[in-house]
Amino acid sequence: MNVKVGIVGAGYWGKNLLRNFRELGVLHAICDNDPGNPNISNYGDVRLYTDYSLLLDDEGIDAVAIAAPAVMHFDMVKRALERGKDVYVEKPLSLTVAEGEALVSLAEKTGRVLMVGHILQYHPAVIKLKELISSGALGKVDYIYSNRLNIGKLRTEENILWSFAPHDISVILMLLGEEPTAVSATGGAYLNKGVYDTTLTTLEFRNGVKGHIFVSWLHPFKEQKLVVIGSKGMAVFDDVSKEKLFLYPHKIEWKEGRVPVAHKADYQVVPFEPAEPLKEELRHFIDCVGSGKTPKTDGKEGLRVLKILERAEMSMSSGLSCANNDAAMTSRNLSPSGPGVFAHESAYIDDGVRLGEGTKIWHFSHILKGTSIGEKTIIGQNVVVGPDVTVGRSCKIQNNVSLYKGVTLEDDVFCGPSCVFTNVYNPRAFIERKKEFLPTLVKKGATIGANATIVCGNTIGAYSLVGAGAVVKSDVPDHAIVAGVPARQVGWACRCGTTLKFTRGRAVCGYCGNEYGLKKDEFRVVREK
């Protein structure tokens, strides 16, 4: 079969697909939204489209190769499969497990080839490394770690986990032949809030093996190494070096059966037949399209990697390790299932959210990116928090409350049902005023009653009480009780919430015994238990 391929995207990576498909003799068409793209100037003999729909209408194309931004993968792959085209798509397969599952199911239903660009599985050095492990040359594998580090192209939308880590996740799964039972990850967002620049992911496998994946684009030099530690030897795949694959026959012996002693040995360069990994990968795709056989990195393999990416991202958001529980990993509708954190299956949690231990999030609530929620906070039904909102520990946010950008709750704050926070003082539907957001601070221990409205730009004092239905348009002092429209002070509250009665400038709480003083409207704490 004379396969004809159409390429979608001729940018940073797409230009490499163009070259290789041309050299393999199957390049038929290019789709790029910029007809002046210099990467396509040397391909005037092939068809050029600026509209993806027209590329799919081309009956001369058997398969499409997609090198578009990851956010576009799902829609593009879906449309191509529905039009009867075989598909090669660069990693990741999609941005959610639910989308990945839908694409795998569609490929099976339509009988089309779906292959994901996990290029390292076609690297001859990695293939040789797999042979070393399978032959027992390294003995029992104890752990694997990889570093994919560089200072180079920085992304402002797709974070480093999704950009770099899929390569190493794919390879580790292939080398070990199984999926991890637990995934944990940490990361840092230094250039753009919520977009991780560095991540460290740990994979734990049933046989006791652990894998560590460190990726960063804020590193002083380029490093691409994967190290396999075995009981009989150690192997290093160094993609930056000329030789690529090294064997270290170091051995660990036990002196008197209880003291480990390392016996070092000179490394050996492991020979293999050289080949360009990308060309081998695309050659494999063409062969699968022509024969109808299943690719080595088919949609199911891409889906396995995608599940681990989601579990790693969930771990970074919740600060917990994520067990292998597919029911808790569906889409980005994340339900942290680690000890002490609960989110109902209908709750929706964005990327870059921090959840403290003991947090509970109930039905139909949405936590937006950049939000941080402290320990033991309870969020009721139909609550929206974020983006970039900070909520302290042990807060209680009742049903139908929205905390918008600019709102900060300190510890122990109570927000009654349907209370309202604004972030623009004079909103108009037809005027954009996002740059005019005003901050609102609710200090420790404050209580806001049901259906109260807190106008932005004000501070609600510590242990103050805002009455139900009140409209707060100015700062509320610490321990003050305010009510009405607009809200006016009507009394003082103890730390425990009891209304205080002052006699000659002194009040002792009848509930908890705390003592307070009042002189010329100046409230002071005399003694608190």
Image (spheres, rainbow, N blue to C red):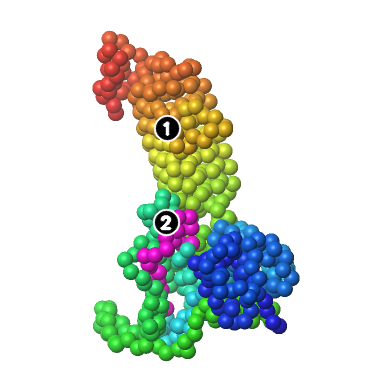
Location of residue 309 in the rendering, given as x and y in whole percent from the top left corner: 50, 62
Q: Residue 293 in magenta?
A: no
| Residue receiving disc 2 | 196
Q: Secondary structure at mark 2?
A: loop
The answer to which of 419 and 406 lies nearer the viewer is 406
- Residue at the location (42% across, 32% down)? 438
Q: Residue 158 in magenta?
A: yes
Q: Which residues are magenta?
A: 141-162
| Residue receiving disc 1 | 438
Q: Mark 1 is on which residue type?
A: Leu
Quadrant position of the N terminus in the picture: bottom right
The answer to which of 105 and 43 lies nearer the viewer is 43
The answer to which of 464 and 497 lies nearer the viewer is 464
The answer to which of 284 and 267 lies nearer the viewer is 284
- Residue at the location (54% across, 65% down)? 37
Q: Mark 2 is on which residue type?
A: Tyr
Location of residue 516 in the rendering, given as x and y in whole percent from the top left corner: 29, 20
Q: Residue furthest top?
A: 504
User: In which quarter of the view is residue 112 placed?
Assistant: bottom right
Q: Compared to 405, does 304 lie above or below?
A: below
Give me the disc on residue 291: none
